[in-house]
Amino acid sequence: MTLARWMAPLAAVTLLAAPLPAALAAAPQAPAAAPGLYQFSVTRLDGRPVALSSYRGKVMLIVNTASKCGLTPQYAGLEKLHDAYRAKGLAVLGFPANDFLWQEPGTNAEIGEFCQENYGVSFDMFEKVAVKGPQQAPLYRYLTSPETNPRFAGEIRWNFDKFLIDRHGRVVARFAPKVTPEDPAVVKAIEAELARR
């Protein structure tokens, strides 16, 4: 074997081992993940702040509520869900809002009293917020924005719009205001998420 024939394979190996041009060598960077749902803090009706990260590992049903709406009786269905599934990891979170025909005019104290006296609400209720418009609460901006919630984005349509959040803080379903908490589709979705880890 001549020296030239012996060196040819080495030249090929050397070419393969040569460093790639910088443009090819650098792996493309994944876009930065959007801040998650757990970044937000909210305030209970009694004024106590709560970090949504305290619900990490739970399935959440986030609902904007109102006391003087034709859909107000859904409080009873939400309480039933809370009673039936809280031990399995469901947290129902109610956010009163006065954005639709002034159907939640009361103070936070009045809202709490109304919910307790009329529906025996024991799930977590938070202070009144704006769920749409220029004063929209950051949590609801996150839930309705196509940038942070591309699958279920869109303006809040009315009182009792419902977002289902999985155990990792991801929005996995949204139910229209007229879809009641007892609706089989809602119950099925909740049970499916509770079964996942």
Image (cartoon, rainbow, N blue to C red):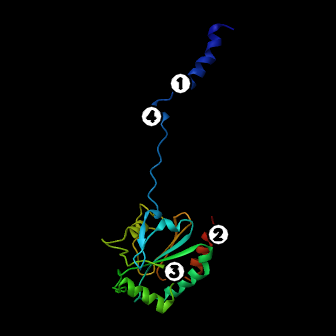
- The mark closer to the camera, 4 or 2, is 2
Task: Provide the residue designation for mark 1.
Answer: 18
From the viewer's perspective, tell me whether residue 29 is left or right of residue 14. Answer: left
| Residue type pointed to by label 2 | Ala
Horizontal side, residue 107 vs residue 176: left or right? left
Query: Sequence order check: which comes first, mark 4 or mark 3?
Result: 4
Closest to the observer, 88 or 46: 46
Vertical order, 111 against 20 (above or below) = below
Q: Which residue is mark 3?
A: 123
Q: Earlier in the sequence, mark 1 or mark 2?
A: 1
Rounded to the nearest angstrom, the CA distance separating label 1 from label 2 is 51 Å
Residue beneath label 2, please? Answer: 195
Q: Earlier in the sequence, mark 3 or mark 2?
A: 3
* Image quadrant in which the C terminus is located: bottom right
Q: Is residue 180 visible?
A: no
Extreme residue toward the top, this view: 2
Q: Which residue is depicted at the point 44% across and 57% down?
A: 34
Element on which disc 4 rests: helix
State the SS at label 1.
Answer: loop
Q: Where residue 102 sits: x, y (%)?
A: 33, 85
Foreground of the two, 176 or 113: 113
10 Å crowding of disc 3: few (<14), some (14-19), many (20+): some
Q: Determine which residue is flagged by label 4.
A: 23
Q: Which residue: 47% across, 29% down? A: 21
Residues at marks 4 and 1 touching, judged by CB atoms closer than 8 Å: no
